[in-house]
Amino acid sequence: MKAIWKREMQGYFFTPVGYVFPGVFLTVASVLFYMEILSQRSGDLPSFVSEMSYLWMLLSPVLTMRLLAEERQKKTDQLLLTSPVSLPGIVIGKYLAAVTMLLIVSALTLLYVLIVAIYGTVYPGELAVNYLGFILQGCAFVALDLFLSSCAATPVTAAVLAFGANFLLWILDLLETAVRAEWISAALKFMSLYSRNEPFMMGQLSFAGIFFDLSFIVIFLALAVFRMDRRRVGR
Amino acid sequence: MIELDHVTKRYGAVQALRDVSFRIEKGETVGLLGRNGAGKTTALNLITGYFPPTEGTVTIGDRSILADPRHCRRMIGYLPERPPLYDEMTVESYLRFVCELREVEKKEIPAHISEIISLCGLEEVRRRVLGHLSKGFRQRAGIAQALCGSTEILILDEPTVGLDPRQTVEIRDLIRALSADRTVIFSSHILSEVQQLCSRVIILDEGRMVRDFDRNEPESAEIRFRLKIAGDGESVMKRLQHLDPEIHAEKLPAEEDGVTEARVVLPRGGDGGAAADRLFRTLAAAGLAVRGMREEKETLEEIFISSVRK
């Protein structure tokens, strides 16, 4: 598993992805920071962190698209699937690599926090909960997108599927308010990653939210393992 | 060491392998021969545990690959038809990754990699990116990854396909060197390659195993000689046919005037040399003037053609 993680990290940093991805994320985040914080002379970091989670939703497919789909396309999966590493080991190794990128990007965004801290007041407890929500939600998107990468034949297809799925999760919130049937609305609210993330953005540590995100991650990683196993058996 | 017991593999409605059974002992070099789509790659993929059989069992060492995949896979190095290379990695970092994947002790990795690099002739490209290598070097890197770890079994799927003649010879030499202390199984449809490298040949056709023979052992109890005997065809053949009830002769088209050419078949009765001595003495005793005599062996090509369906 560690070998897989290490290779994926090399894969990111031996190619432009490892540099372009954080670069693009930080560029867009800087624009948002300017609009939300600097131009408004505001210290509302929770809103900014909340907006970063939408940004992650848009960019996460770029990180995950090649994780399993490219292995299949280039037939390098033959090396992994004939090695002593188990299928869960392969999936978790790849997942942790993408999560590491999420943590790197999160760490880089602390620069914005530093700027606010210089000119205003930062509430560390609240900010920690904001970031916990952002990271948990990011991890959930990575798990979903990794599963979709295991379903796709090419990285491009994986990216399109992942972007579509992330977008669908986003519009569940809009659907929830548009649907009249109460039980459907409740079900949509239950499934929405964004609704689950709201308490974190308000600085409230939500154990239900943590449990939901962790369950979401475990389910989609298990589905990715199951998908790879089915493909292998059914070859 | 490797045993396939009544193995069948189906891909949906397509039956890629049908009730195949064979056993390969430690140290053997076995060639899997067959036309395209005969089931060679499927057989290799089943041995490596890349996918499971639909029916039957695959045993590596003394363990089933399904029951103990980790143990079995540690013993096997596999070069698929397309080498599984990550183009952005250097040769050295790639081999390091494969060593880690195959659970080689961390402190042993540098020495192990150096040994493999030297064995596979990759010294000059060890720091080069895989994506920039020639096809020959890529194939070598593919073989090198199959050697990482304590692999006792080397499985190579069409290892020389797409290489130029010089690269083909180099890869063959490398396989020959590696087979000295490993069990090697490789698939090919190049008969000369199998002839040069393998001690044993398994021929697959339409998913069935149609032939399994050791190239060092005599295939049949009979031995064939091609003879050139001075004299008129009819009288020579008459005398040949009455030499011995165990010797059967048939006339062949003659290439020279005054010389009769014939094929004689007799019981092997020991090694080929003993049969040749016996035949020569019999011919001499009968007063036939032998101008030439050579053993006719069934070539791999003849065996292959006679084994596969038209």
Image (spheres, coloured by chain):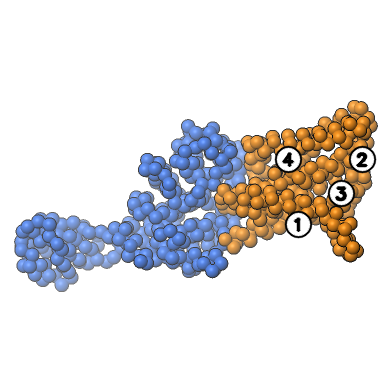
Labelled pair 2, 4 in contact (Cβ < 8 Å): no
Q: Are marks 4 and 3 on the same chain?
A: yes
Residue hosting label 3: A197
Q: Residues within 10 Å of mark 3 (few under 14, many from 20)?
A: many
Q: CA distance from mark 2 to mark 4?
A: 23 Å
Viewer-proximal residue among A43 and B204 = A43
Image location of residue B288, percent across then percent down: 7, 62
Disc 3 to disc 1, C-alpha distance = 18 Å
On screen, residue B246 above or below A225: below
Chain whose colour in the figure is blue:
B
Mark drawn on residue B35: none
Q: Residue furthest top?
A: A118
* N-term mark: 2 or 1: 2
Q: Nearer the viewer's eye, disc 4 or disc 3?
A: 3
- The residue depicted at 89 percent of the width and 44 percent of the height is A201
Residue at label 1? A219
Amino acid type for the residue under numbered disc 3: Asn
- How far apart marks 2 and 3 lie (CA) works out to 14 Å
Q: Which residue was labeled with disc 4? A: A101
Which quadrant holds residue A50?
Answer: top right
Residue at position x 59%, y 51% from top?
A: A72
Q: Position of residue B37 (x, y in %)?
A: 45, 60
Q: Viewer-proximal residue, B62 or A139? A: A139
Say which amino acid is labelled 2.
Answer: Glu
Q: Amino acid at mark 4?
A: Met
User: Which chain is depicted orange?
Assistant: A
Nearest-to-viewer mark from 2 and 3: 3
Instruction: Name the mark nearer the viewer: 3 or 1.
Output: 3
The answer to whether the residue labelled 2 contacts the one labelled 3, judged by CB atoms less than 8 Å apart, is no
Dot 1: what SS? helix
Please report, as a chain letter, where disc 2 is located.
Answer: A
Amino acid type at circle 1 is: Ile
